[in-house]
Amino acid sequence: MGLGGATQEPGFLCIGPRRLARQCLRCCGQCCNFVLDCVDVALRVIGPLFVLLALSLVSFVTYTFFTVLIPHLADSGTSSSLLLLEMALGCFLLVNILYNYAMAVCLNPGVPPEFPGEALESKDGELGDYAPAPKQCHKCLKLKPPRAHHCSVCKTCVMKMDHHCPWINNCVGANNYRYFCLFMFFLAMGCLYYTVLGSRLFFQALVPARKRTIKLKFEDIQCVTLSWLVSICIFCAICLLGGFHLYLVLTNQTTIEFHTNMAGRQIARKRGEIHRNPYDLGMSRNFQQVFGPNTFFGFRWLLPYVARRPTCNGLEYPMVSDFRA
């Protein structure tokens, strides 16, 4: 009881609406951060499982190709020379799939180097030969160059970060982006190759046994059906993802920059202005920034173990203004 017999209102009723709104927003922010932290932990835990799953799928389709599909092609009257050619092409695609996947998984995506302490004090000015000077990340306390971002899963900054991919248990950044793109390309070609070669066997497996023109064991039916469906599904998914990344390569954007540039275009449109990507140097230069100074129709860029490496160091990137100056 208060003075004069008046009752004292509970404390939460005395909180102003603005203060209550701020507390609610703070609580929501903490909940969101907790959920994001849980997602980051989950990605770190299940990342190796995704890699194991990817290798298992590739191994299963490869096993079916050599133990089921090739023998049936031989029994169907395919000439030995054509059969050897089909096997050689399959091995070529498999080697490039595994090589580019291994490089995307194992290669450092591009962690910024440790700069000396005096560079931290001059980060708002010029830093050596790099202009503008990289900013300092407030999370990992490293200097991050332009186009670098902090990965909450890897707990470090990544130069020209595109995204963190659970399928490679690694970030996609400046050093492994071309291997990531080539992995998608060869995986799509491998899936398409298997889908085309195995289509007759797949449709034969679907018809009743008495109507089949090819004798198939029950185990072969299971392997062919599952591997063909896996291949066609992966091919469709990779076409969508690969098409998006082809657009990013030709316009010199990362996935993160794609979203920021899209937001920038919307803001500029409202102001009656035109938003331009400062790193878009034209399709040819954009392509060579990712795959190195190799001519497109020379197709050397498809084989990174013999192609010339990209010349960008990850710390600085040419801009449109550099060519206009």
Image (cartoon, rainbow, N blue to C red):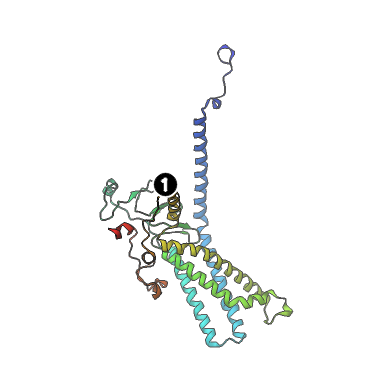
Res 316 seen here: no
In the picture as drawn, the residue positioned furthest to the top comes out as 4
In the picture as drawn, the residue positioned furthest to the right comes out as 210
242 is higher (above) or lower (below) than 14: below
Q: Amino acid at mark 1?
A: Arg
Res 129 seen here: yes
193 is higher (above) or lower (below) than 234: below
In the picture as drawn, the residue positioned furthest to the front comes out as 272
Residue denoted by label 1: 271
Residue drawn at (61%, 76%), measured in percent from left and top? 199
Mark 1 secondary-structure assignment = loop
Residue drawn at (58%, 66%), measured in percent from left and top? 233
Residue drawn at (41%, 56%), measured in percent from left and top? 161
Give coordinates of residue 61: x percent, y percent: 57, 72
Q: Quadrant of residue 215?
A: bottom right
Q: Quadrant of residue 248?
A: bottom left
Give coordinates of residue 140: x percent, y percent: 38, 49
Task: Estimate how packed mark 1 is, as few (under 14), some (14 to 19) or many (20 or more) residues with alpha carbons within 10 Å.
Answer: few
User: Between residues 49 and 87, which one lies in front from this camera angle?
Assistant: 87
**Image quadrant occupied by the N terminus:** top right
**111 on left or right of 191:** left
**314 on left or right of 200:** left
**Image quadrant occupied by the C terminus:** bottom left
Give coordinates of residue 149: x percent, y percent: 40, 52
